[in-house]
Image (cartoon, coloured by chain):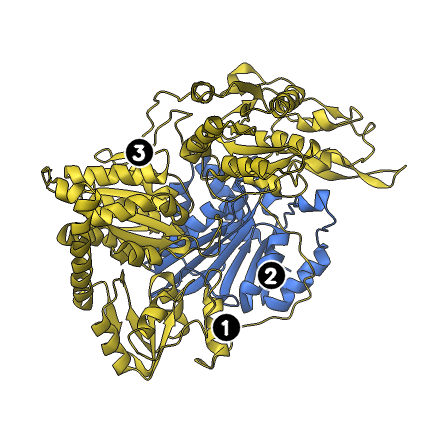
Amino acid sequence: MRQLLSGNEAIARGAWESGVDVATAYPGTPSTEILENVAHYADIYAEWSANEKVALDLAIGAAYAGKRAMAAMKHVGLNVASESLFYSSYTGVNAGLVIITADDPGLHSSQNEQDNRHYARFAKVPMLEPSDSQEAKEMVGAALDLSEQFDTPVLLRTTTRTSHAKSIVEVGDRRPASRRPYQKNPQKFVMIPGFAKHRHPVVEERMVNLAEYAYACPLNRIELGDPSLGIVSSGPSYQYAREVFPDASFLKLGLVWPLSKKLIAEFAAKVKRLVVVEELDPFFEENIRMLGLPVEGKNIFPMVDEFTPEVVHHAAYTAGLIGQPPVEYVLAKGALPNRPPVLCAGCGHRDVFWLLHKMKLTVNSDIGCYALGVMPPLNATDTIGCMGASIGVASGMRRGELKGPNVAVIGDSTFFHSGLSALASVVYNQTPVTTIIVDNRTTGMTGHQGNPGSGLTVQRDMHLRVDIEAVVRGMGVEEVATVESRDLDGFEAAVRRAIESHKPAVVIAKTPCVFVTSYAREAFQVVEEECNGCTLCFRIGCPAIHKSDVMDEQHNRPKAWIDPLACVGCGLCFDVCARQAILEGALKAQSTLTTQIA
Amino acid sequence: MITANFLLAGVGGQGTLLASDIVAEVGLCIGADVKKSDVHGMSQRGGAVTSHVRWGERVASPLCEKGAVDYFVAQEMLEALRWIEFVRPGGTLLLSDQRIVPVSTVYGTDQYPPDNHMILTFKQVAGKVVMIEAQKTAEELGNPRVANSVLLGALSAQLAVPEADWLAVIESRVPQKHVEVNRQAFFIGRERSHLI
């Protein structure tokens, strides 16, 4: 049967068809939908682990135990899991293990554009890269077979484009894999120096064997066309290149590491000019150049940002590879207003960053929806690095004798991901830093997944909720306050008290997510006669508040207007309005509420 | 075989992705190779959303090249202006007259561009501009969410694809109780969209 599937859906389907029994992940764009789709198959055990390293360790353990396993994560998630990738390269597996790394060229939702093909070379494991959904599905099975054949974890790399684009997939049935019984073998599975030393030559030999295998690997193919131009490419870049160079010869790589010298040399001998079309780093290009072959790539195509058909077309035209120029219009559009990502109407994080901005604190923030606290008009945030960095950086700023107070801000899911060990370090070293845990009971930015604090699993079971306050107190933090972010005065007092304690302190701010809870009141309204267009409520950056067509005549400026369809009744505008020009919405009937918040 | 490049653009919450899923499924129905790709930022609501759909004998890239879109369905005026360069010279723009004002015009100095300026720019690129009162029509039908079906109806009038294929896909993608109102919306769009 033919279905239109995204790359992520196809990977989930491929895992099911290829007999995967255990699948793990931590949510992260663009990889999130892989596990969400795996979770629909009742014959696979699927879990959101607390972070990517835990997810990979779990998948490794399942493979040791004899079940086919998959761990999925975004590119930077593999940084978190990298230590486990490296040891599993040495130990090898038992049953097949595939690790999905979903890279994000173009930074659609990431802090960098790292090219994870380097991890394959670095950790000495093979890597596959699909260029559409059909290949994505097939390569999951191919990766598991290779994993068992060569006793190695196998990386499968997608990019945002392959993960999210939909194309036609021929779906099949599940082929259950036979269990491969676990046998105790410490020399293979225990990586103490004396044993690991003997595994390293095994790894080197494996990579030599894999490079030999790469020559005849059916995932690599030569498509001979016009011999004057030979393109080496993989992934979505291959698809763009296919459109821009319809007549050229192609070496299409599906096994992107290790590379077959013999295959590349054979292809190079058939073409006059060898050009690599690859997004991000010159990974193929440099490895081909090391073979002593004349090759071009980054002299023509950009190193930064995502490729698109027009990027490839434009670069190819500029370099004289093709004669047809791209379509260019000269339009007097002027500067268009952007639609930058904004916190949703009613988002509890808006209370937090409104307050922190008002208190003029230095804010060391973290990864999640609340990263938007840096955007205008809130402009509250000073630093964001990676998952869990907030607490360590905030501690370092204290040790670095920053002038004036600072706070760490971290979400509930991020706290469980990698904030726990940082907070333990704060307690251990008695660093006088305040951590604000913004707890919205969900993993918001990736689409509202459960986490240890919510107890909701990916297969929709409700388990124990890990109690953040009990965890923090159990670690030995003495200055702990739990407040509602909507209680601005109580929240401000708690933050002040925490900072002034000059001790390790935690403020847990309950910040409602409008996707999981609803407010008790209907939409608020502006009382037109009272509003004088002072702009105070504009400065909370709420997408429900607009400039009215009605002007305040005394000041000649527009009054405020609240869009009744967008307002969810949080009341922050009511709190900040200095003229009592905002009318509270009526109380909703109890029956219309899901989880009610004040 | 119909070979066509479609671009759909709107604002998060307008149902751009569902509408483009429907266009892609219709392509599947008529036996085309189909690829589809969405482009959107981090925001949950209110961000700019585009979706590329391609039908053909054999489609390689899931993204349409700038300047190569045959049919551009814009659910919002400013988004139409933002992405107008994707339309091929002489291509078709199907435009909902809806305006959704971005937050940046509220706290900043950004201005929403005036209608006449936008329409002149559209006509510089597109050979055909079809204006659709999708939102007003949907509200008259008593369900603001069916604006998309009005637009899809208008798009369907441009293509030699059996009406039944469109209806079958739409019906499979909307809740049972909303099928009838979506059918009505589709037919209004198919019959009443007009050139400007």
Of the residues shown, which amino acid type is indicated by label 1? Answer: His
Q: Which mark is residue B129?
A: 2
- Mark seen at residue A314: 1
Chain corresponding to blue in the figure? B
Q: Is residue A553 above or below residue A210?
A: above
Mark 2 element type: strand
In the current view of this chain or complex, which residue is farthest to the top? Answer: A590
Disc 3 marks which residue? A47
- Residue density around tag 2, few if under 14, some if 14–19, many if 20 or more, within 10 Å: many
Q: Residue at x 43, y 30 (%)?
A: A420
Task: Report the Cα–Cα distance between label 2 and label 3.
Answer: 49 Å
Q: CA distance from mark 2 to mark 1?
A: 28 Å
In the figure, is residue A48 to the left or right of A298? left
Query: Taking the image as drawn, is residue B139 in sight?
Result: no
* Quarter location, residue B93: bottom right
Instruction: Check disc 2 and give the amino acid type.
Output: Val
Residue B80 percent across, percent down from the top left: 60, 56
Q: What colour do you see for chain A?
A: yellow
Q: Amino acid at mark 3?
A: Glu
Residue reaching furthest right? A554
